[in-house]
Image (cartoon, rainbow, N blue to C red):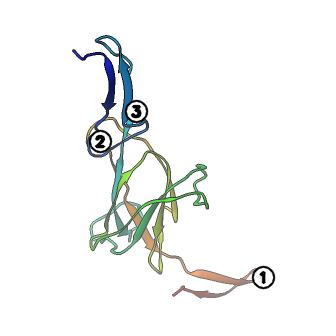
Amino acid sequence: DLAPGTYTVVQILPPGYASVTPDAVTVSLENSSLDNINFSTYALLDIVGVIFKDLDGNGRQSLGEVGQPDVLVEIFDDVNANGQIDISDTLLESALSDIQGNYILRGISPGNRILRVNTPAGMSSSEGEFVPLMLLSSGVMGGNLRNLNLPLVEAPPILCTVGNLIDAKFNPA
């Protein structure tokens, strides 16, 4: 039993969680019981995946399709949920893929997000440059890992036209 008085109730978060509410609340105790002290928390998310050369174009990593190293992957807060990176959207996390094409973005808050893949020259992402994501948090410990593989394909040649005729074809450097 606690004696009447003023106390501070503190929420201690486990690793991988964040709080929506303040982590400490001051309360006055007049008798021996106190009800309705609520804290709101959510689990942070990790996004992992492999960036690979999708030689057969099926969107899945098949035998012989190697990971692509040194690809920059960035995730932004999509403030207005329009699926585009705007001036008000902030960069939350970025990562370079390793020698096997693996990447990980750690500690991402749930919400509307945009993943941007900075593809190497001569390649493009079959997912597009911007991948809109709606991330939801799971209340289950350890259930906050999202797997997102990113296939890359050879960029198609750029066709130059004059009027209705194709004049030349070249691959960008």
Q: Residue 118: x and y, percent?
A: 46, 71
Q: Residue 163, percent across and down?
A: 78, 82
Disc 3 vs disc 1: which is toward the camera?
3
- Can you say which quadrant of the picture contains the N terminus? top left
Most foreground residue, 53 or 4? 4
* Cβ atoms under marks 2 and 1 closer than 8 Å: no
Amino acid type of the residue tagged 3 in the rendering? Ser
**Left or right: 73, with 16 as reference point:** right
Task: List x then y, in percent, for residue 85.
Answer: 57, 60
Query: Cα distance, mark 2 to mark 1?
Result: 55 Å
Task: Please report whichever mark, 3 or 1, sits nearer to the chain's N-terminal start.
Answer: 3
Instruction: Place residue 13 in its image quadrant.
Output: top left
- Density class for disc 1 (Cα within 10 Å; few <14, some 14-19, many ≥20) is few
**What is the distance, in whole Å, between disc 3 and disc 1 at their CAs?**
61 Å
**Furthest residue to the right?**
163
Amino acid residing under circle 2? Gly
Say which mark, if any, is on residue 163.
Answer: 1
Q: Is residue 38 above or below residue 30?
A: below
Q: Label 2, label 3: how many angstroms apart (C-alpha)?
A: 18 Å
Q: Which residue is mark 2?
A: 143
- Looking at the image, is mark 2 or mark 1 nearer the viewer? 2
The residue carrying mark 3 is: 40
Q: Looking at this view, is 123 or 26 the one in front? A: 26
Please name the residue shown 61% across and 49% down the image.
80
Residue at disc 3, secondary structure: loop
Which of 52/17 is in front? 17
